[in-house]
Image (cartoon, rainbow, N blue to C red):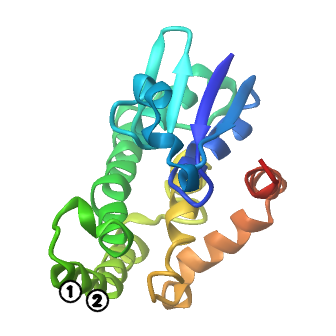
Amino acid sequence: MLTLYYAPGTCALASHLALEYSGGPYEAVRVDFSKQEQRSEAYLKLNPKGRVPVLVTDQGVLTETPALLQFIAQSFPDAKLAPLADPFLMAKANSFNSYLCSTVHVNHAHRVRGSRWTDDEQAMETMKKKVPQTMTESFNLIENTYFKGPWVLGEQFSVCDPYLFTLAGWLKSDGVDIEHFPKVADHYRRMAADPVVVKVLAAQKAPA
């Protein structure tokens, strides 16, 4: 049994969706950020970073979304959530997910987590003002270069798709209109209507 620790509204949604798509057995445990549970002694024993997602497996604990997504895809190969038999396409999938993790997520975090980089309030405000620009630039690159359509990798749905859906869901709060990116917007609407996505979002919104 796999156990996913998540918080609503975070990148952990991508792993939560991937687990549901996998069809494998798992348990999802909510971490209440409002109560600072991610800083509790018990949680920090699981993940000293104090962040989500965390995936507890029979072999140990995993963190970082790209790693969790690949682990899920490889653990449940029948679900065909990644091009496991194609080394080049698998590398493309990891490249895309790494870009979301290392660049797009960081752009977004400059608006909501400025204290990670500075204690200067003015500097934090400057970072916030830059977010619409950096998120627009990142999604322009995704729209025009990385997105093959109808899914991220082309005809095959993969773990890249729930990850893109998760971060595209942050655009509105970052001051960016998703309709500027027609392919991404279409992808987001199709994902949002998928019964798997509807189920997981409802579970994350349910009272703890």
Is residue 159 shown left or right of residue 49?
right
Q: Quadrant of residue 99?
A: bottom left
Mark 2 lies on residue: 129
Q: Quadrant of residue 48?
A: top left
Percent x, y for residue 77? 62, 24
**Residue at x-position 73% and y-position 66%:** 192
Q: Amino acid at mark 2?
A: Lys
Percent x, y for residue 62? 43, 26
| Label 1 CA crowd tier, 10 Å (few <14, some 14–19, many 20+) | some
**Residue 83 in view of the camera:** no
Mark 1 lies on residue: 126
SS for dot 2: helix
Q: Quadrant of residue 118?
A: bottom left
Q: Amino acid at mark 1?
A: Thr
Percent x, y for residue 196? 79, 50
Q: Nearer the viewer, residue 183 or 206?
A: 206
